[in-house]
Image: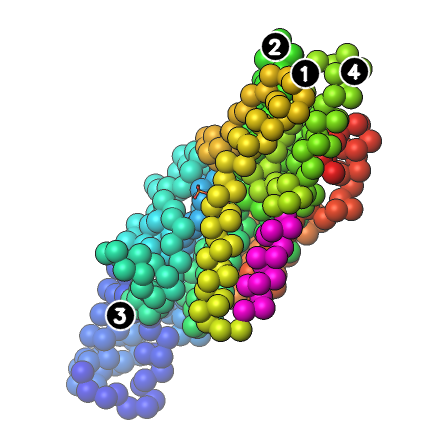
Amino acid sequence: MGRPEAGRLKALTCMPSGWGSVNDSVRSVRIAITHSLNGDIAPSSLLAASIPPVLRLCRNEPNLMTQHIGILTSGGDCPGLNAAIRGLGKAAQEHFGMRLIGFLNGFRGLAQDQTVELDSAMLSGILTDGGTILGTSRDKPHRMNIGGKELDMTDAIVATYHRHHLDALVCIGGGGTQKNALRLADVGLNVVTLPKTIDNDIAMTDRTFGFDTALQIATEAIDRLHSTATSHERIIVVEVMGHRAGWLALEAGIAGGADVILLPEIPYDVVQIAAAIRKRTQSGKRFSIVVVAEGAMSMEDACEVQSLVEARNAADTKSGRFEAKELLRKFHDEHVGHTIRLTRHLEKLTGQETRLTILGHLQRGGTPSAADRVFATWLGTECATMLEEKQYGMMLALQGCALKRVPLIEVAGRTRQVPLDHPLISSGRHVGTSFGD
Ligand code: F6P
């Protein structure tokens, strides 16, 4: 088509491209312009007749153009992800007229352009389902295993974003996802995030969805373990998840009436734990429940980690830093299973039969609790409003009773651990719980 005169170009300035019906609209406008340039028909009347309402509005109101939103879930799954996708999807489509495209399996789907259109049928009937209809992975944009090689897929991701004419990308995930989302914001993508994880350890938000369900599952498990511990007069050690934060252990321990709660934030001394259990025995209580966060550590291990971290921070060459990081990684790898060693040690010190239950991924599975459904839905619908207002580079956070928009830079790379002066720690101590210190 020839170059139209400047005066007639106005009708073209707001034309989006791509995606089904919009393409059809663009085609009709193109035909109209071609006709008008040939002098066949009066341009204004033809344009008015051929441009569908949405584009007519676009001519005067650019903000009313359909926004195209990408959405992905990344990191470990948790209950409530589907509720968030549904809340966001329904509000975005039905309230703001946006179109949603889902990327499968976290950032991998974005890098490899694996998509699913999130239409109303896809969003229906998923509120109570665990897991995520989009699938998830722990892949990072800048370090992705592709055919056995670790590649930086950032350029491929940027290309996918533009290929789908996205106005914004919503990343729903935990701490790692916040970092990856910031990386994508830094290369110019409009990114918004929602905080999910059973660990409840994302900086700047008081809650993450998934936590409440995991807390219920862990509490119910502790309740059940009580009756078998009592019947056999045993010590039962229960390991809960939480990564390097103790929120899940602290709250499940208090809710389940644990006698000992071990948190990553308070390094423990096994001799003190044994002393607390012996004291119970002397007072006639012949069973004990010990709730251990997977990231909890003995005082000796905590000292070792501290020196490894210091060595990593002090390393002034690339290879030195790499080596120090490897040592730290190795330490954490070997730390998995520390509750088995702790269980044996306790049995030896107390002379009482001791058993271990590791709750593991049970805590991440199944139907979300009512609180997680409500919170995830609220985050999703508020996220749609945020997208409508074109507020990017932010995570939605719960602060007090309100949702706040927090810059990603203030979230990424930070974790929220249990502060040592947290009221629940003193509450636990007041009901006689030992924290192993
Ligand atoms: O972050 C959620 C979480 O379940 C942590 O509590 C746990 O440490 C980790 O994920 C386990 O990850 P994966 O499922 O990849 O083994």
Label 4: state its secondary structure: helix
**Marks 2 and 3, how far apart in space?**
75 Å
Quarter of the view holding residue 353? top right
Label 2 sits on residue: 232
**Marks 3 and 1, how far apart in space?**
74 Å
Q: Earlier in the sequence, mark 2 or mark 1?
A: 2
Label 3 sits on residue: 26
Front-lying residue, 408 or 276:
276
Do the CB atoms of the residues marked 2 and 1 lie less than 8 Å apart? yes
| Circle 3 or circle 1, nearest the eye | 1
Label 2: state its secondary structure: helix
Label 4 sits on residue: 282
- Which residue: 58% across, 46% down? 244
Q: Earlier in the sequence, mark 1 or mark 4?
A: 4
**Marks 4 and 2, how far apart in space?**
17 Å
Quarter of the view holding residue 394? bottom right
- Which residue: 72% across, 23% down? 277
Range shown magenta: 302-315
Q: Give amino acid for label 4.
A: Gln
Instruction: Please say whether residue 309 is one of the residues in the magenta stretch.
Output: yes
Q: Earlier in the sequence, mark 3 or mark 4?
A: 3
